[in-house]
Image (tube, rainbow, N blue to C red):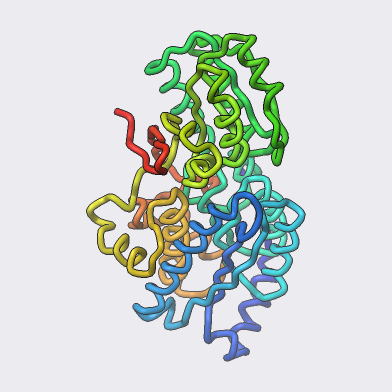
Amino acid sequence: MKLKFGKTALGAAVSLALAVNSPALLAEIKIGIAGPQSGPVAQYGDMQFSGARMAIQRINEQGGVLGEKLVAVEADDACEPKQANAVANKMVNEGVKYVVGHLCSSSTQPASDIYYDEGILMVTPAATSPEITDRGYDNIFRTIGLDSMQGPAAADFIAEKIKPKRVAVIHDKQQYGEGIATTVRDRLKEKGVNVVMFEGVTAGQKDFSPLITRMRQENVDFVYYGGYHPELGLILRQAESSLDARFMGPEGVGNPDINTIAGDAAEGLYVTLPPSFDQQEENKELAKAFKDKNEDPSGPFVLTSYAAVQVLADAIEKTGENDPMKVAETMREMTFDTPIGTVEFDEKGDLKEFQFVVYEWHSDGSKTPVE
């Protein structure tokens, strides 16, 4: 695959020359953190910002990178594509060369176009749509798996463990939700599962009674939902007394706030999530550091965000200079030991290996892995 380069060699040389001749610019390395701090999925942004801030803090405590301090430049994209573009331009204007973000795929993709044009190195810790890296940009990476990994994991579990008779696949018509729902539907069909509905709902919708009525008429006994927790929480609550079906969703629904919305109806929901990295023995000390700050290290995007910062820092150090394009080359050549395991990138900037685990969700917000 031919990679596309976001900044000319001349432009990179000019930027480097300016940096060398401006001592003030050498005092710090800015790391942009871009994600939702407001809006319906701000809880996921909390995970992202928590993980990235902790990594920056600990790296600075160990002397920084190339003797320079990492400084966070934070911005709220509210998981909205237009706001994500504004955030990306803010990063450009503030001289940020490295960005951890964005979180939602529908925000990550348009922002990444701007980062590509401006030669900014981006690592998303949460956006799972394959389309983001399919364009061949050399400066776009991620520290989470793809929907093309997560979708089959969910579909195989449904087909082999649940063995439902009639399945409805529902999505929120957005890049992330519809993308993973499509992957699940196609895999279920390949495995001979009877998918009787493939329907979209609108993000922010409140009344799902027509959808639930149709699922009941179709005798649906299993529902897969592609999207985020606010809508699924309402569907669960509204379907609790009238639809006898089990539900499943991706990491976008794996948030304790779904319990606030759905109440007891969240009990028994199946969710695909990254492994519980915070429970691994090698991360015991790091998990305690989060808890000492009254922060929860268990969210799906906390340690993937930590790993994104760590990978950037390690690659800058290994490269020996603060040049995003050279750092990107280093990232493709190295392996990195991180709290999410050994990280190694393929040519597209995706992880060569990543595992999604099926969990059963409980009405108290806890979860247990399904054997």
Q: Residue at x 45, y 61 (%)?
A: 51
Residue drawn at (46%, 82%), measured in percent from left and top? 68
| Quadrant the C terminus occupies | top left
Taking the spot 48% from the left edge, 22% from the top edge, the residue there is 246
Is residue 89 rendered to the left or right of residue 103? Answer: right
Of all residues shown, which one is farthest toward the left?
281
Q: Quadrant of residue 13?
A: bottom right
Tell which of 130 and 43 is nearer to you.
43
Q: Nearer the viewer, residue 176 or 320?
A: 176
Q: Is residue 80 left or right of residue 237?
A: right
Q: Position of residue 26 (x, y in %)?
A: 54, 85
User: How far across and down, in percent of the image, does residue 346 sit?
Assistant: 48, 45
Figure check: 352 above or below 270 = below
Tally the numbered discs.
Answer: 0
Q: Position of residue 222 (x, y in %)?
A: 51, 18
Between 121 and 224, which is closer to the camera in this rendering? 224
The location of residue 92, given as percent across then percent down, is 70, 69
Front-most of residues 210 and 96: 210
Looking at the image, can residue 65 be seen? Answer: yes
Task: Quadrant for residue 202, please give it.
Answer: top right
State the quadrant of the N terminus. Answer: top right
Q: Is residue 346 visible?
A: no
Looking at the picture, does residue 249 appear above or below residue 126? above
Position of 270 relative to 279 (above/below)? above
Quadrant in the picture for residue 119: bottom right
**Residue occupying image coordinates x 24% and y 56%:** 282
